[in-house]
Image: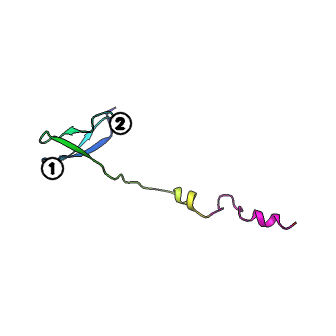
């Protein structure tokens, strides 16, 4: 179970120490500093995201009608009667 716990970055305003803790979701947000013992604050970091393959851009924002082939031609061929 230890492997499935998230890592949290903490920073102490008193001594300037930065450290990482592996905590449960239910654990208290405020944790003691590992250097001086005062309350350290949890830091929020950007998570790197890498999109690979054709992905959402081609699927959601690609050429209109490319998925069905002739979605724009259906109205012009019906008017020939």
Q: Which residues are magenta?
A: 64-80
Most common SS among magenta residues: loop
Height in image: 12 above or below 58?
above
Residue 72 is at least partly visible in this image: yes
Report which quarter residue 78 is drawn in: bottom right
Residue 54 is at least partly visible in this image: no
Height in image: 48 above or below 73?
above
**Residue 16: numbered disc:** 1
Task: Left or right? Give the position of 9 relative to 71.
Answer: left
Provide residue 76's location: percent of width, then percent of height. 78, 67
Task: Left or right? Give the position of 26 relative to 33.
Answer: right
Point out the tag, 2 or 1, that comes first from the N-terminus: 2
Residue at image point 71% right, 64% down: 72
Q: In the structure shown, which secondary structural element does the residue marked by tag 2 occupy? A: helix
Q: Quadrant of the N terminus?
A: top left
**Residue 65: numbered disc:** none
Residue at image point 61% right, 64% down: 63
Q: Is residue 77 highlighted in magenta?
A: yes
Residue at image point 83% right, 66% down: 79
* Residue linked to disc 2: 4
Q: Is residue 13 highlighted in magenta?
A: no
Residue at image point 35% right, 36% down: 4
């Amino acid at each position: 179970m230890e492997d499935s716990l998230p890592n949290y970055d903490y920073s102490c305003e008193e001594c300037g120490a930065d450290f990482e803790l592996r905590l449960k979701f239910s654990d208290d947000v405020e944790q003691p500093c590992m250097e001086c013992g005062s309350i350290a604050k949890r830091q929020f970091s950007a998570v790197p995201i890498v999109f690979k393959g054709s992905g959402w851009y081609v699927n959601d924002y690609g050429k209109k009608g490319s998925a069905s082939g002739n979605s724009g031609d259906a109205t012009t061929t019906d008017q020939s009667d």
